[in-house]
Image: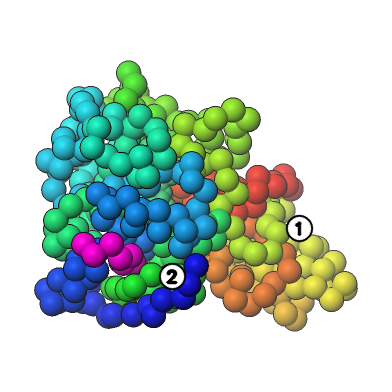
Amino acid sequence: MDSLPTRLLRVNPLQPDPGIIREAAAILRAGGLVAFPTETVYGLGALATDRQALRRIFAAKGRPADNPLILHVAHPQELATLARELPPAAWTLARAFWPGPLTLVVPRAPQVPDEATAGLPTVAVRLPDHPVARALIEAAGAAVAAPSANTSGRPSPTTAQDVWEDLAGKVELILDGGPTGVGVESTVVDVTGPHPVVLRPGGVSVEALEGLVGRVTIDPAVEGKPLDGPARSPGMKYRHYAPQAPALLLEGSPEAIARRVVELAWEAAREGRRVGAVVMAEEGSLLEGRLPDGAVLRILASRDAPEEAAHRLYGALRAMDRLGVDRVLLAAPEARGVGLAVRDRMYRAAGWRVEQV
Ligand code: TXA
Ligand code: MG
């Protein structure tokens, strides 16, 4: 695709300047692409009613055409206009978690373009909890389709600089509202069946969903169980969120993981290669001072602080690319709360290569 002049505008994340929001909304209404911050990750927005703009999203990201987009709304009632019918669980969950990092998959209304749903009979809808995102959607006057604003396959962007790295020359505008809070994407929940199914774990925990609606199942595509057949959430079948260097997820006690990281790092060093380790504080403290020169160590958070790990994960994975390591070693937090999402992203980053130590 031809290179466009991409503008980067700083915007106050708490109280966005109405002039900047008007300008950004005008770009969307004219068929342009605008990247903007949400509470999870940065999104790459296009007007959901503009088929050609939707196609531009796929081109800019290099996104497979069978992977549908999330439509972002500014008010909960808009869910009713995008859905053909609303299962009761949809309202229950929307009322409890919107605005917030929850995406609802509902039967799609006929006017929702195929480009947004990749031809599926359902549509994904979310009301983000970020003043810039909400002001932009409101000013755009229609739902805004927005996948994460990264090149397909790369870690999602949590800063405007990350977006710039991937999309400069491909979008009209990037709104810089500073680093995002949650750090991993929204939880995608299919409410079309008898009970809710989590298609992608994210910012809203499974425990919180269960607390509200009782029985919730987790799609088998989550956490290192790739499907052979068609995936219910097409985005879940790809190696994703991945650094450029091959990655390996290590599972075991902090001591065993640290021992294996040291072993692999020195083995690599002897061959003139460098490893990067993205680990939890428990392993990190054991690794300090034990790695060869050139090895990179990024500590996310302690194993029982998954929110903090989520907040730092993608930045750490992108740092591995910037620092040009030859191999990435990962260690995950517990699968509690948002920790399930962090583990899921690490499995995908590693292309499901896991070693028990
Ligand atoms: O936090 C987020 O959700 C971010 C911010 C920007 O809102 N957006 C995001 O979008 O992560 P994206 O496109 O990177 O991921 C959307 C996920 C994909 O896994 C996609 O397959 C799934 O949602 N999805 C979208 N529509 C769907 C549908 N109708 N049925 C099942 N899965 C769907
Ligand atoms: Mg994405």
Q: Is residue 7 left or right of residue 133?
A: right
Q: Tell me if mark 2 has few (under 14), some (14-19) or many (20+) residues whose alpha carbon lies within 10 angstroms of its own.
A: many
Residue position for label 2:
170
* Relative image position of residue 90 (x, y in whole percent): 23, 31
Q: Is residue 33 magenta?
A: yes
Say whether residue 134 is left or right of residue 266.
Answer: left
Please provide percent x and percent y for residue 312.
46, 65
Return the x and y of residue 144 as percentages of the image width and height.
Answer: 26, 54
Quote the CA–CA distance across marks 2 and 1.
41 Å
Question: Above or below — where is 163 with respect to 49?
Answer: below
Query: Going by the picture, which residue comes out furthest to the top?
Result: 194
Which structural element holds mark 1?
A: helix
- Residue at 41% over, 76% down: 4
Name the residue beneath numbered marker 1: 260
The boundaries of the magenta stretch are 29-35
In the picture, measured across the screen, residue 228 lies left or right of residue 52, that is: right
Q: Amino acid at mark 2?
A: Lys
